């Protein structure tokens, strides 16, 4: 989506969310739209469309979340793929602060997920579990059904997951919740480390170097969790 079109789309979604929140009984409107929004999200629409629907969802949601257990489970798969897409689509630059241009764009996409995590700690827990499964290849069908593609692109997936975890760490509210799930983050870290010596997937040398750098980046997060 072009920058000018994206700005118009963002403005439109802001108006839609405002209208939704003023329709009356938010819990009733949420009950009507929850299933519809989640069904559309499960179809893996473009990033901007997914972000728009997530923003509609949080406009009607509350803290603690109104999401049903089934919706939370479904949304964990959706958000895992969505967050990885954000990492792939919004490049990281030398200025890692959220005040940079890329940082502002990234925060726009990330904020709906962060708000949902604050409203449902279980959702964050499940997302971390799905990400761990993605690294092990057990849930790779969420992104691609091709095992060969997994071997070729695993470093890209790992880099994206590590980036997402580090962004979570920089968000104060999410950072506090991460402390509750040290075990899940440790599992992700161990899964990444194990790929360096795993021969059956036949990860190319250059991919292993990228994985090694991702491990070094992840140490920043894991060390802070145990301070």
Image (spheres, helix red, strand yellow):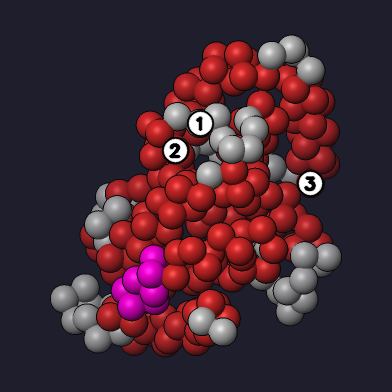
1 or 3: mark nearer the eye: 1
Drawn side of residue 175 relative to residue 59, left or right: left
- Decide: few, some or many residues near mark 1? Use Cα within 10 Å; few <14, some 14-19, many ≥20: many
Quarter of the image with the N terminus is top right
- Count residues near mark 3 (Cα–Cα under 10 Å), then give few for <14, some for 14-19, many for 20+: few
Whether pointer 1 and pointer 2 mark residues with C-beta atoms closer than 8 Å, the reply is yes
Which residue is under mark 2? Answer: 72
CA–CA distance between discs 1 and 2? 6 Å
> Would you name the residue on which mark 3 appears?
3
> Comparing marks 2 and 3, which lies closer to the viewer?
2
> Foreground residue, 169 or 66?
66
Q: Which residue is mark 1?
A: 67
Helix, strand or loop status at disc 1: loop
Question: Can residue 127 be seen here?
Answer: no
| Residue 51 lies in quadrant | top right
> Residue 160: x and y, percent?
51, 66
Assign the magenta stretch its main secondary structure.
helix
Image location of residue 220, percent across then percent down: 56, 83
Mark 1 vs 2, N-terminal side:
1
- Left-right relation of 225 to 148: right
Q: Residue at x 68, y 49 (%)?
A: 111
- Identify the residue shown where x is 19% and y is 81%: 199
Q: Residue at x 39, y 74 (%)?
A: 186
Residue segment shown in magenta: 183-192
Q: Which label belongs to residue 126?
A: none
Q: Is residue 195 magenta?
A: no
Q: Position of residue 132 (x, y in %)?
A: 35, 63
Is residue 190 highlighted in magenta?
yes
Say whether residue 47 is left or right of residue 145.
Answer: right
Rendered image quadrant of residue 204: bottom left
């Amino acid at each position: 989506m072009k920058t000018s079109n994206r700005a118009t789309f963002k403005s439109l979604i802001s108006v839609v969310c405002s209208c939704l929140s003023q329709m009356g009984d938010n819990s009733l409107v949420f009950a009507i739209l929850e299933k519809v929004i989640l069904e559309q999200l499960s179809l893996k629409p473009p990033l901007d469309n997914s972000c728009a629907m997530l923003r509609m969802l949080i406009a009607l949601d509350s803290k603690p979340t109104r999401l049903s257990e089934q919706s939370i489970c479904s949304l964990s798969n959706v958000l895992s793929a969505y967050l990885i897409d954000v990492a792939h689509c919004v490049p990281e630059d030398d200025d890692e602060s959220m005040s940079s241009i890329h940082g502002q764009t990234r925060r726009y996409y990330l904020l709906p997920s962060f708000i949902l995590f604050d409203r449902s700690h279980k959702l964050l827990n499940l997302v971390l579990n799905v990400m761990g499964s993605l690294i092990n290849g057990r849930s790779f069908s969420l992104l691609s059904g091709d095992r060969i593609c997994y071997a070729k692109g695993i470093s890209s997936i790992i880099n994206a997951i590590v980036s997402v975890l580090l962004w979570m760490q920089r968000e104060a509210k999410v950072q506090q919740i991460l402390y509750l799930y040290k075990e899940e983050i440790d599992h992700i870290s161990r899964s990444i480390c194990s790929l360096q010596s795993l021969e059956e997937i036949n990860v190319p040398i250059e991919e292993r170097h990228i994985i090694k750098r991702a491990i070094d980046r992840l140490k920043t997060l894991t060390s802070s969790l145990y301070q």
